[in-house]
Amino acid sequence: MTAAAPTTQTPGPGVPDNGSPPGAARRALRAVLTRRELLLVILLALVLVWMTALSYGGYLTGPYDPDYLSAALVDAVPLAMLALAELLVIVSGRGGIDLSIGAIVSLTGMVFGFSYGSWGWPLPAAVLLAIVVGGLLGAVNGVLVAWLGFPALITTLATYYAYKSLAIVVNDQKPISTPGIQALYSLTGAVEIPVVGHDIPNVPLGVFTFLVPAVVLVWLLLARTTYGRRLFAIGTNDVAATWSGVHVARTRLVAYVLAGVLAGVVAVYVTGQFASARPDAGTSGNGLALPAITIAVLGGVAITGGIGRVSGVLLAAVLITWLDAGILLLFEGNNGSQFQLLALGAVLVFCALLNAYTIRRYGGTR
Amino acid sequence: MIAPLVSGQEVVLLAVIAVLWLVLGWATPAFLTADSLRPLLIEVAPIALIGVGMTLVIVAAGIDVSVGSQMMVCGVITARLLVEAHVSLVVALVAAVAVGALMGAVNGVLIAWGRVHAIIITFGTLNLFQFVGRQIFGSRTVNGIPATLDVFGRGAAGQTLGVPHSFLLTAVIAGAVWWYLRQTPGGRHFYAIGGDALAAELAGIRVRRRVLLTYVVTGALVGVAAIFTIAKGTTTLDQSIGAGEELAVIAAVIIGGTSIMGGRGSVLGTILGALLVQTVSSGVTQLGWPSNLSDLFVGIFVIVAVGTDLLRQRARRRSR
């Protein structure tokens, strides 16, 4: 995908690249590979230019314009938030991953549907309940993985099974869509941004009420608190972290709880987006966990832990969303969603290979 | 070091399955009859067969979550060959195995030579294979599948002395792999890789080729399992083939006592694990509970199995 790819072969394995002459091309390549944000911006520009060109050429079934891109951000909100959840969990290290995140969305969404839609709780209480339930479900993963030392992969696979099953059984496979729930659809409406709103398209409300607060909070947590430093410390080397006085199990547990909390908030958003609490909201098709993990990996999160940035994940979420939105216009009918699978899979494999190569050659992304 | 013929976990599993069967037989008297157990064995066969390959993969410290999508591709290609080219049983089998092995090779090459964790690669190829499968389906179902595969089907042609052929073939393949893993140096190599890939490399094992082999074998077995799945179904094949298969298979392998960290496990345990998973899901249906509830129990069984594996590891470390 990158134009610079063919030049990657230059130094043989084992040759220390620090001593080789720093040609401009090589420096550029190094920057693109180690600064994931740079690569993502380039890819994003490529996608936008390519799709817009196709749009002007009349190859698309609809216009690929700022209005369409802005409306597509509706789908970026849950994906980006779940990718942030995966960021926290994967950064915590020791094979950290949360496959159950989509099932947490389903189950929490049902709980939210019951409390707000059926029992008539006020909205703040119902949202709080969703957050608490999401956190508890995440805590089950966290206790098993962080305290008891279960491998995250198989543990969250098992809880995925369990949560998914509970979400489907709890209301006998039926969604909850009482009038109260349907009114939540306004969460996904578009709003005009004050001051500059006339010149740019309206942006979905969820971007401001859900995505921006989540991004800011996670960024503050990772970059500006001691917890963030501890999380990166245990992800990089948990033995060293233990010896420097970090409570590894507690720190890792909190990462899983926070992932669950984020999933709980996403459940509220997704319930609004569908105007109903669906028992398969986060698990239908390939579920939400897979794109979330893809976006995290694409955003430069190292699957081995200790490396990852909020900005990379956010850019990756936007890239995937706009790529998917373009693909949908590129094909007639059902075919578009199939090519989205192709794009998602190809991007994931490509990024994983790229990450592995970057780590071998430069010791990781920054 | 030669592993004992039957491990502790396998004895426990046998006991759990026996208890479940007795309880189910007591709760629904129709359960412990040949007419009820035969469909159970037919349902177990594809899970157990893929599980045999997955045991190899996991013993060598890998994982393959793309087997469900692989099954979709093998299934739709075979079904369309049967319908449109009227191929014979042997040709269908060869085609399914070849297609499966090819997809396994894609996984294996990317994992062994790309040096990326298996979960990420197979998550990616899960999507790619699903794309391929759906393209071949072309938004339709495959209708009018002929009776070529009846030798593995549910009817009288599909059984000998009351035992389904699909289960018999699975048992034969599992027996062969079990013997290979236990008794041959090549088989022990997989355990060595799972225990410590670097040490295995230094001991002269060609780690990459061995890892590639585990995925190719799994893919080939997925091909055979796809044949079983078409044979036990109706004359129509829809896009849901293989959906969720990877979860059932991985659950069976882990419940069977194979360590997710690699280096330990047996094919016999996997067969028992598959039997347990299928017993739970048929049991839930026969008790009249919501069928989706079986996933909850399977999840709990997996957690328990991983927990016992961890306890055993700690005990072993302490005894040293």
Image (cartoon, rainbow, N blue to C red):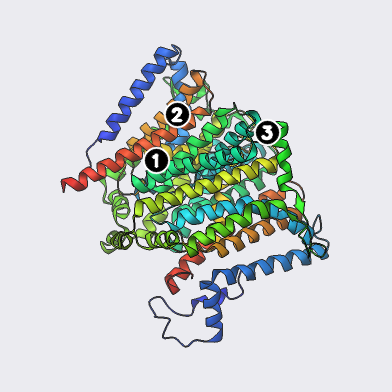
SS label for mark 3: loop
Residue density around tag 1, few if under 14, some if 14–19, many if 20 or more, within 10 Å: many
Above-or-below relation of A166 to A221: above
SS label for mark 2: helix
Above-or-below relation of A357 to A162: below
Marks 2 and 1, how far apart at CA:
16 Å
Residue density around tag 2, few if under 14, some if 14–19, many if 20 or more, within 10 Å: many
- Residue A277 visible to the viewer: yes
Residue B236 image offset from top left, x and y in percent: 64, 31
Residue A27 image offset from top left, x and y in percent: 53, 82
Q: Are marks 3 and 1 on the same chain?
A: yes
Q: Are marks 3 and 2 on the same chain?
A: yes
Above-or-below relation of A187 to A172: below
A358 to the left or right of B241: left
Chain containing mark 3: B
The residue indicated by pointer 3 is B143
